[in-house]
Image: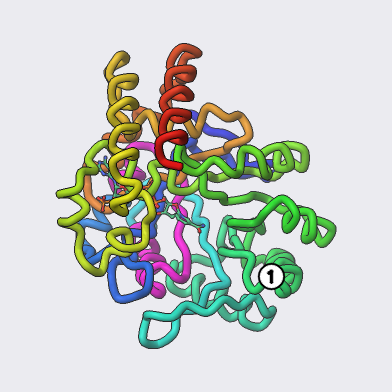
């Protein structure tokens, strides 16, 4: 699988990384319903066997569960794997409330806990999960730089930061990477910060390239109804709500036709579309069952042609005009 260098770091990431949000399972505010741990382990090992060389996780996913599972899988890996995790969102004991905190002492404590759960001595890429509270982002990034000096993390990155927020913390030290949402349904980063990242040699690891599964081609009203009540997508993901769902389904039908011309499917198209941008180092694809990431992997070696890109853009513009 192709690799791209993460900004000016020494990390060479495969163009698909494995995301572990859903692997965090249920029991917290943004859980994806119940998740079988055996499936999670097999999914991670499948990703590694396909050549994926990095995993994205976060302390908050399942309130530590995803990191623990990733740590166990890493011990069985047959080749070196980079681990990226995130800090700054603290889960309350009841699992429902999430409190943002970027105070230095809190970030340092979180890092120690992540190192223990992941069972590693150093985290390859440590990221601030959200720029919240906004008045603490400089303190939080300074804490990451301190952890780097101490050898606890190799590179310091951020997620969900705007261009202004990147510019605000950048004088403190080099930002290794930005992790923004980026999919055919969420394109804000194209206008906001991709050029900033290229100019500042800041890598870009794009999250939710299939918009939390919405662009995989399986979504119907029945599928939404079948989601577990504690799968956050059922009530909180705007693209699955009744006012947006028909337009989303029409868009995916168009993507299916475009993809089929070269023997691909909409999920692969969604990921290949994100990877068309040279500023993007890697797309973080989430998977929770064996077979899912195996199906997507072809996207890593699919360069969309000019005609496909025009048709995709037309489909997207039609979607915009119908959904607004
Ligand atoms: N920094 C942040 O704030 C942030 C936010 C979001 C995500 N992320 C990171 O980015 C990763 C990826 O994002 P994501 O998990 O939201 O979304 P995604 O990659 O757009 O979608 C992943 C989901 O799609 C479904 N899926 C995957 N492969 C499939 C296949 N072949 N056929 C059918 N369905 C399939 C699975 O859920 P079902 O089977 O349940 O449908 C899977 O969990 C996360 O895991 C996380 O590491 C970071």
- Tell me if residue 50 can be seen: yes
Magenta span contains residue 137: no
Residue 40 spot, x, y in % from top left: 26, 58
191 in relation to 232, above or below = above
Q: Name the residue under label 1.
A: 134
The quarter of the image holding the N terminus is top left
Q: In this view, does 96 lie to the left or right of 290?
A: right
Look at the numbered disc 1 and say if its residue's Cβ is closer than 8 Å to ligand 1.
Answer: no
Measuring 59% from the left and 57% from the top, which residue is drawn there? 159
- Tell me if residue 150 can be seen: no
Measuring 28% from the left and 37% from the top, which residue is drawn there? 249
Q: Give the range drawn in magenta.
A: 45-73
Measuring 69% from the left and 64% from the top, which residue is drawn there? 148
Measuring 31% from the left and 63% from the top, which residue is drawn there? 235
257 in relation to 99, above or below = above
Quarter of the image holding residue 94? bottom left
What is the chief secondary structure element of the magenta stretch? helix
Residue 241 spot, x, y in % from top left: 31, 54
User: What element does badge 1 sit on?
Assistant: helix
Q: Nearer the viewer, residue 59 or 193?
A: 193
Q: How is the image coloured?
A: rainbow
Q: In this view, does 67 lie to the left or right of 86?
A: left
């Amino acid at each position: 699988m192709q690799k791209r260098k993460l900004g000016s770091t020494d990390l060479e990431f495969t163009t698909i990384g494995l995301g572990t949000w859903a692997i965090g399972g249920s029991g917290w505010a943004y859980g994806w319903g119940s998740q079988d741990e055996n499936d999670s382990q097999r999914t991670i090992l499948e990703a590694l066997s396909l050549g994926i060389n990095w995993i994205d996780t976060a302390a908050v996913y399942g309130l530590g569960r995803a990191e623990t599972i990733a740590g166990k899988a890493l011990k069985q890996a047959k080749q070196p794997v980079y681990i990226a995790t995130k800090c700054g969102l603290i889960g309350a004991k009841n699992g429902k409330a999430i409190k943002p905190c970027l105070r230095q002492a809190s970030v340092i404590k979180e890092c120690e806990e992540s190192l223990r759960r992941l069972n590693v001595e150093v985290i390859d890429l440590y990221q601030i999960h959200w720029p919240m509270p906004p008045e603490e982002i400089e303190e939080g990034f300074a804490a990451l730089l301190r952890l780097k000096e101490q050898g606890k993390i190799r590179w310091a990155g951020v997620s969900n930061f705007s261009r202004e927020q990147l510019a605000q913390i950048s004088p403190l030290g080099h930002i290794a990477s930005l992790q923004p949402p980026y999919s055919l349904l969420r394109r804000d980063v194209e206008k906001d910060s991709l050029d900033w990242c290229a100019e500042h040699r800041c890598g870009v690891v794009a999250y939710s390239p299939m918009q939390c599964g919405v662009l995989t081609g399986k979504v119907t009203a029945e599928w939404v109804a079948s989601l577990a009540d504690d799968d956050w997508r059922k009530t909180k993901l705007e693209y699955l709500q009744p006012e947006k769902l028909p337009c989303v389904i029409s868009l995916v039908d168009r993507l299916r036709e475009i993809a089929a011309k070269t023997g691909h499917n909409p999920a692969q198209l969604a990921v290949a579309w994100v990877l068309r941008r040279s500023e993007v180092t890697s797309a973080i694809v989430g998977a929770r069952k064996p077979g899912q990431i195996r199906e997507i992997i072809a996207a890593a070696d699919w360069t969309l042609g000019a005609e496909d890109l025009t048709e995709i853009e037309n489909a997207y513009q039609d979607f915009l005009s119908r959904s607004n």
